[in-house]
Amino acid sequence: MGYFLRRLTFYFIAFLVAATINFILPRAMPGDPVTMMFANATVQVTPERIAAMTKLLGFVDGPLYEQYFTYIKSILSWNLGVSIQTYPQTVNAMLGNAVGWSLFLAGTAVILSFCIGSVLGIFAAWKRGSRYDAFISPAMLVVQAVPPVVTAMIVLYTFAIGLKWFPTSYAYTPGTMADWTSLAFYKDIAYHAVLPLFCATIIQIGGFLIAMRNNMINLLNEDYITMAKGKGLSDNRVVFNYAARNALLPSVTALSMALGMAIGGQMIVEIIFNYPGLGTVLLNAINSRDYQVLQGQLLIMTLFMLFFNFLADLLIVALDPRLRKGGK
């Protein structure tokens, strides 16, 4: 419990630091968001209306510390304000509509790439120097080295535009009513997610493969592995029960960081496939100087990053008996 409370306190302080940076950065950007919002207005906008809108969106004159405490209060009450880009829609509603799609796409891609890359890395280490290792490791590194935008464009052109096997964009068929009780609707979502999910997965497999391979190679020379082989245990038992379990510990941290970054790290894939996730929302908010959405987006990314790192701390303690004994 002491370890749990110490880590929880650390992450709470980290969240406050991140929230402070999140407060400062948008205000350091050039441009007036309210003026930009009314720049293309077709009707005359009075100074009174601009002042009212400025107050509504929270860009009021006053000491910076007062604005800061107002901002912290709004975070604790989870009132992120009103979007400038899609006024009068609230930031909560705007981000709430997108976060589910990003969680589905990015979260599934990270988990799939971790599972596939770890299994491939285990066998690459066990069969080190074989034809399999000589092929799979460089091949995955080459795929990872290709910029995500290139990978996504090749996949889009080949399978969507050329072969016409899959749709080119959107999360489900345009004009379809979202019926979350219909199996056909879920099939439509899965059908539209095939290409972006494939791209988001394949570009991450190489990192997990190489990490697991290196961890396994270091462990395969340990005395307890030699003893397990000498006792006549099967290869599968030696690999998975002895080596892979310990090699998995460093990969847990990598997985947690990848999950934390995934919530906003698939922006290129989302933009190319016009997927309605947080990456697309973030790009549009940057282009329109939508400070409220920027702050809300970065806040969500921070929360996910801290949460998954905290989860990694707990998982490592649960997986490694030595840490549990040390804590006692």
Image: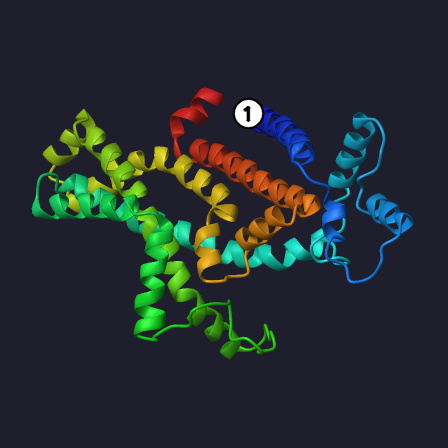
Q: How is the image coloured?
A: rainbow
Query: What residue is rendered at 9% in x and 39% in y?
Result: 129
Identify residue for label 1.
3
Q: Horizontal and vertical percent for residue 216? A: 23, 35
Query: What residue is rendered at 18% in x and 48% in y?
Result: 136
Q: Horizontal and vertical percent for residue 322? A: 39, 25
Q: Horizontal and vertical percent for residue 173? A: 51, 75
Give the secondary structure at mark 1.
Answer: helix
In this picture, residue 152 sits left or right of residue 240: right
In this picture, residue 42 sits left or right of residue 8: right
* Residue type highlighted by circle 1: Tyr
Where residue 76 sits, quadrant-wise, is: top right
Q: Look at the image and tell me whether residue 113 can be seen.
A: yes
Where residue 175 sits, quadrant-wise, is: bottom right
Q: Look at the image and tell me whether residue 79 can be seen.
A: no
Q: Dot 1: within a 10 Å radius of its alpha carbon, few (fewer than 14), some, or many (20 or more) residues? A: few
Q: Horizontal and vertical percent for residue 108? A: 43, 55
In this picture, residue 58 sits left or right of residue 308: right
Q: Is residue 205 above or below residue 213?
A: below
Q: Is residue 119 above or below residue 30?
A: below
Query: What residue is rendered at 23% in x and 38% in y?
Result: 213
Q: Nearer the viewer, residue 220 or 324?
A: 220
Q: Nearer the viewer, residue 74 or 150?
A: 150
Query: What residue is rendered at 15% in x and 30% in y?
Result: 227
Q: Is residue 157 above or below residue 29?
A: below
Q: Quadrant of the N terminus?
A: top right
Count of marks, rendered view: 1
Q: Which residue in the rendered view is the most extreme toward the left? A: 130
In this picture, residue 189 sits left or right of residue 179: left
Q: Which residue in the rendered view is the most extreme toward the right? A: 48
